Image: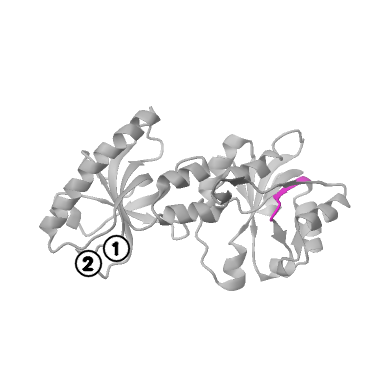
Amino acid sequence: MIPLYSPQLARTPTALALGSFDGLHAGHRRVIEAITKGSNAVPTVVSFWPHPREVLYGESRLRLDLPSEKTALLEPIGVEQLVLVPFDRSLASLSAEAFVNQMLLQTLKARLIAVGANFRFGRNREGDALTLRSLANAKGVEVFVAPLLEDVGGRMSSSRIRSALSEGDLERAKKLMGRSYSFRGRVVKGRGIGKKIGWPTANLQVDGRKFLPGLGIYAAWAWTPGEIEPFSAVMNLGPQPTVDPNSPSAVEVHLLDKEINLEGYEIIVEPVLRLRAQKKFPNLELLSKQIELDAQLAREKLKPFKIKQN
């Protein structure tokens, strides 16, 4: 994968695309495409970490793509490094002009800068794309401003992807991102209740900064990094209303027709279809019977997806 750098360690000079690029949808790729062609500088994506709204307003901003995931997505489209600019109140206090001069021109030695038309930066968001163009052009640096991309649903945005995932609409999220949504987590020891009722699950510890789909039961693919063939699976995302109504939200994956001890392993999960909402059952026997129905439905729904993958 491409390297993940701080600004001071980045290879320079750079042709840089500046923005969050969360979800890496077609509008983001249009911005990034501008820095990967016809420049002798290092094609570089530059983002803030953490998100500015986390620092300034205390908002929790879960990511569609964590930095380690983003490097794998950027490499195939011609980017050679991902640079994360540490965002703190000191950086937030910089004027638009100071940010351009100190970070983009002096530290990253930008030779070309690409942003989306709605890009804002500098103290109190005082700078916009036109401000950036004016400041950079004055130093002989070209700025490409990509127009906003729209489809029949409106402006292409990360918010639309999050909305689709929150509703459990994986197909709509896939169309917006141009790829399947997935997440990863390490398998940790659970309470073993699933195994007792005949449905052992891999309990995943997922990075708390990752945006997950809406609660429910899903048909999914699951695999360990490096595996060629994914396993079909049923995933429970949310609390355990039958076993422990007060339990925190969890990610539990049952591999269909496979018995593998994955404890300690990292696995990747690609939810494909939301089968149903969570439901509290009167007893574990009825819960087991429902999981059996979920498993059968998942087998049926995953068949056509398997054909597509091949």
- For the residue pair 126 and 167, the one nearer the viewer reads as 167
Would you call the spot at circle 2 few (<14 residues within 10 Å), some (14-19), or many (20 or more)? Answer: few
Residue visible at 45% across and 46% down in the picture: 172
Kindly identify the amino acid type of the residue bearing the numbered disc 1: Pro
Locate the C terminus and report the quarter of the image it occupies.
top left
Would you call the spot at circle 1 few (<14 residues within 10 Å), some (14-19), or many (20 or more)? Answer: some
Q: State if disc 2 and disc 1 touch (CB < 8 Å).
A: yes
Q: In screen coordinates, is 139 left or right of 307?
A: right
Pinpoint residue 33: horizontal percent, then vertical percent: 67, 39
- For the residue pair 124 and 171, the one nearer the viewer reads as 171
Which span is picked out in magenta?
A: 112-118
Residue visible at 37% across and 35% down in the picture: 227
Q: For mark 1, give the secondary structure.
A: loop
Q: In screen coordinates, is 160 left or right of 31?
A: left
Residue 269's disc number: none
Q: In screen coordinates, is 225 left or right of 202?
A: right
Q: Which residue is mark 1?
A: 239
Pinpoint residue 214: horizontal percent, then vertical percent: 38, 57
- Whether 246 is drawn above or below 206: the answer is below
Is residue 106 visible in the rendered image? The answer is: no
Residue visible at 72% across and 61% down in the picture: 121
Magenta region's main secondary structure? Answer: strand
Q: How is the image coloured?
A: one colour
Magenta includes 117? yes
Kindly identify the amino acid type of the residue bearing the numbered disc 2: Asp
Judged from this view, the residue extending furthest toward the bottom is: 57
Q: CA distance from mark 1 to mark 2?
A: 8 Å
Pinpoint residue 299: horizontal percent, then vertical percent: 25, 38
Residue visible at 81% across and 52% down in the picture: 133
Q: Which residue is mark 2?
A: 244
